[in-house]
Amino acid sequence: MLKKFFKAILAILAIAIAVTAYNSFSFQKRLNNRALPSYYKKGVYHLHSNFSDGSGGIEEICRAAQSQNLDFVILTDHGRPNLQAAAATAWIHDTLLIGASEFSLNSGHLAAAGFRIPGYIFPPEPQEAIAEVNRDQGVTFISHPLDRKIPWTDWQVRGFTGIEILSLYQQAMKNIFFSVAVFPLQYLFNPDSALTSVITYPEKEMRIWDRFNQKGKYYGIYALDSHAKLQISKKFRFRFPSYESTFRILNVYVKVQRELEKDPQSAAASIIAAMRRGNFFSAIESLAAANGFENYYLEKDGRQVEMGGNAEAGGGVLVLKLPFNFSTDILIKKDGGKFKTIRDNNRQEIAIPINRPGVYRCEISPHSGPGSDLPWILANPIFIARSRNPDKPETITPRRILAGPGEYFQIEKNSLSQAAIQVDDPGSRLPVIRFTYVLRQESPAIKDFWTAMARRENLDFSNYRGFVFETRGSRPMRFWLQFRNGEDRLESAFQHSFLVGENWQRIAIPFARFHRLYGPDATADLKKISAFFFTIDNGNSYSGSRGEISLRSIGLY
């Protein structure tokens, strides 16, 4: 009986191996020998090196990119920012390495590129982090938004560049049984087949993306999230898939306005600027190269509007160039709904009349064979005759002043840090409080260091929406505003960061935006405030940092 059982198991295993081998060896990339136009640069986005949790160095990564004829790679090692990765921009092996970072935020992960490295740590609040990168004309993409372990949770954010529609690593980890039992065998037979087989149509991500585009401009991108390893558990991992194999699966085609400069910073800025405009598309490269694809809108006067652009009016045509030697299926969406479907297309160019305002975007799939159910090419939207009503900023003034005349705050700090408070014009109703500090870490083993202006007092904030105050600093820096309720083991702390500039500015932070730092209460009890603090520490700055912050009109609104 036992012998029969083992024979059955071996027979099933043999069949599984045979089917896997057949599927692997029968998988073939469709031929497209068309040269990539010089104004398009092909690269890969979202990968990790040994600067964080990737397995390889930047030399290895760029050699792999060169072997696949890629023009650029965007490195997104973990950190806020990752200082090594962010400073790594360079031409290496004829490939442009663009240094960037993947921020770990309160609401998930956000990949950012094109920012200047600040003298402080980027904030953990998503809207604050997005605003800082935007000030530098950089780009931000929500990473693996529906990941099982690290999903994105703050869907109220605005102003980011886009969203990862496909994340190869996330797709591979969706089915852990497949990843452990079948994937290694299939990868051994045919890496391209194995990696492509984990991809499914990203229906939920598409819906989220289309919903955001009803109120703003957001772009979709295909991401590798490549680590050159497959982590199964904390102790068990495979040393594959390699960087080179993942670089053959998902590519990003960026349309630049001029040839990339020899200076790596200038060249990286050209790629980032095109991505910020939305003038790029993504492709499942393992199905076929997308060389020669074009998507733009021709207005009635002949003006060409690229992907990501705004057209003034309808009445023009949406142009698709499809110079491929195999047939394709075309799906055009308007405002997230189906607008037009063309199946088994063999035309090299299609012009579709557009008469109504809306957000139009295209998905192209092979008509038959492997990947026919996938968005082989994902083009970014074109925004046609859409009205734009920018939000007017709300004017917020204090309804209650907290810090009045006299010594209102006390200094709290770790033993090696230094701090001092000086009150200018202490007799006035609204004095200026100047706080100078030097941060020093106690030892390499003790990570926490801080200085704070503290007010410990029982207060009732329940009739107010948030804090409001005016501030400026000796240099740009990040501070925390923190408040607590309860006491001892029942104490809860909530905080939010703010950016201090060199000129006076008014800052308002609603209580609803504060993040719970610790404690049993998920929401703050605003009737029972026990203390509040203006703090700078190892969470937003570095040991050795020094500076001065001035505050006035500290109150509630």
Image (cartoon, rainbow, N blue to C red):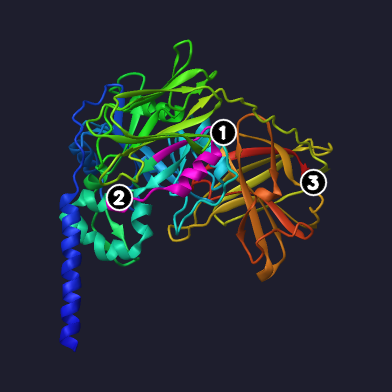
Residue 142 location (% of width, % of height): 47, 44
Q: Give neighbour class at mark 1: few <14, some 14-19, many 20+ (Cα, 10 Å).
A: some
Residue 233 location (% of width, % of height): 34, 66
Q: Earlier in the sequence, mark 2 or mark 3?
A: 2
Tag 2: residue type? Asn
Whole-number angstrom distance, CA of label 1 to CA of label 3: 38 Å
Left or right of 174 in this view: 43: left
In the picture, the quarter occupied by the N terminus is bottom left
Left or right of 260 in this view: 216: right
Residue 17 seen in the current view? yes
Residues under numbered marks 1 and 3 in contact, where contact means CB atoms less than 8 Å apart: no
Q: Give neighbour class at mark 2: few <14, some 14-19, many 20+ (Cα, 10 Å).
A: few
Residue assigned mark 1: 216
Residue 265 seen in the current view? no
Depth check, front residue: 106 or 506: 106
SS at circle 2 = loop
Number of marks drawn: 3
Q: Quadrant of residue 74?
A: top left
Residue 389 location (% of width, % of height): 65, 27
Whole-number angstrom distance, CA of label 1 to CA of label 2: 36 Å
Query: Which dot marks residue 402?
Result: 3
SS at circle 3 = loop
Q: Quadrant of residue 70?
A: top left
SS at circle 1 = loop
Q: Name which residue lies at 43% across and 32% down.
A: 380
| Tag in front: 1 or 2 | 1
User: Which portion, as a residue range, is magenta?
Assistant: 197-221
Q: Earlier in the sequence, mark 1 or mark 3?
A: 1
| Tag in front: 1 or 3 | 1
Q: Give neighbour class at mark 3: few <14, some 14-19, many 20+ (Cα, 10 Å).
A: some
Depth check, front residue: 119 or 521: 521
Q: Is residue 210 magenta?
A: yes
